[in-house]
Image (cartoon, rainbow, N blue to C red):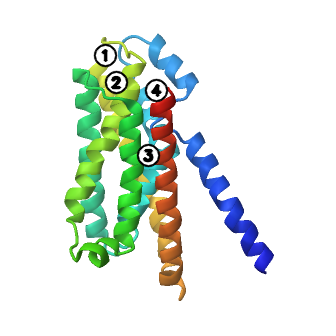
Amino acid sequence: MTSRLTGWRVALPIVLLALATQAAAHNVTEGDAGYIQEIWGVHLIPFLYLGAKHMVTGYDHILFLLGVVFFLYKMKDVAIYVSLFAFGHSSTMLLGVWFGWGINSYIVDAIIGLSVVYKALDNLGAYQRWFGVQPNTKIATLIFGFFHGTGLATKILQYEIASDGLLPNLLAFNVGVEIGQILALAVILIVMGYWRRSERFMTQAYSFNVVMMSMGFILMGYQITGYFIA
């Protein structure tokens, strides 16, 4: 048993690093990037698909969303927090691309990794223990939503999407993102519903949030390293 636990301790950082490397935040695949660069005019369905695909395959999005709803038991609360995140994400993505607001992708993606760390620490009750205060979780969700959207806008701007049909295509992309978010959220809530019935949930929840925090740090480290060696 001891050797097995030691093996997991060695393997876990490697697995997390591999996931973080493959999941460079808000990455757009080469095939999708080529498609975005070549098309001209309004293409609602393809952009709808690309938006949904981005959300479902975006590890950074899913991790943060999971952290946000981890200890939310009422659907009303889930709806409020997810709406705040969606508003933040949508507004900066649309405005960022429309007005050409872009910042260094490594910096914004490091901040997105920080959002995962922040939420995991929040779930662990770290801020109350360390500082004796609880940050406003709704404001934090909204602010980090802004950064998630900025990260995506920065990526899209790099591919110089055609100006003809830009607004309809962006709106379709954003609708796709929200559809993908709903699908991901549905899976998360179903799994969480079963998990919370376990007597070991609270003990396992602590370990899970530690792992999630570690993944956030790895995402941050990956982006910071990329910034200095790029």
226 vs 38, nearest the viewer:
226
Q: Quadrant of residue 79?
A: bottom left
Label 4 vs label 3: CA separation?
Answer: 14 Å
Label 2 vs label 4: CA separation?
Answer: 9 Å
Q: Does the residue at mark 1 contact the one at mark 3 (Cβ under 8 Å)?
A: no
**Residue beneath disc 3:** 180
Q: How many other residues sit within 10 Å of disc 4, few (<14), some (14-19) or many (≥20)?
A: some
**Residue beneath disc 1:** 165
- Residue at position x 41%, y 65% in the image: 120
Q: Does the residue at mark 4 contact the one at mark 1 (Cβ under 8 Å)?
A: no
Query: Mark 4 vs mark 3: which is more N-terminal?
Result: 4
Compared to residue 198, the image places residue 87 above or below, namely above
Estimate the x, y position of residue 14 in percent, counting from the top left: 67, 53
Query: Mark 1 vs mark 3: which is more N-terminal?
Result: 1
Which of the image's four quarters has the N terminus?
bottom right
Label 3 vs label 2: CA separation?
Answer: 16 Å
Compared to residue 6, the image places residue 59 above or below, namely above
- Residue at position x 45%, y 60% in the image: 186
Label 4 vs label 1: CA separation?
Answer: 13 Å
Estimate the x, y position of residue 134 in percent, counting from the top left: 22, 72
**Residue beneath disc 4:** 46
Amino acid under disc 4: Pro
Label 2 vs label 1: CA separation?
Answer: 6 Å
Estimate the x, y position of residue 22 in percent, counting from the top left: 59, 40
Q: Does the residue at mark 2 contact the one at mark 1 (Cβ under 8 Å)?
A: yes
Residue 156 relative to residue 83: left or right: right
**Residue beneath disc 2:** 169
Estimate the x, y position of residue 208 in percent, counting from the top left: 52, 70
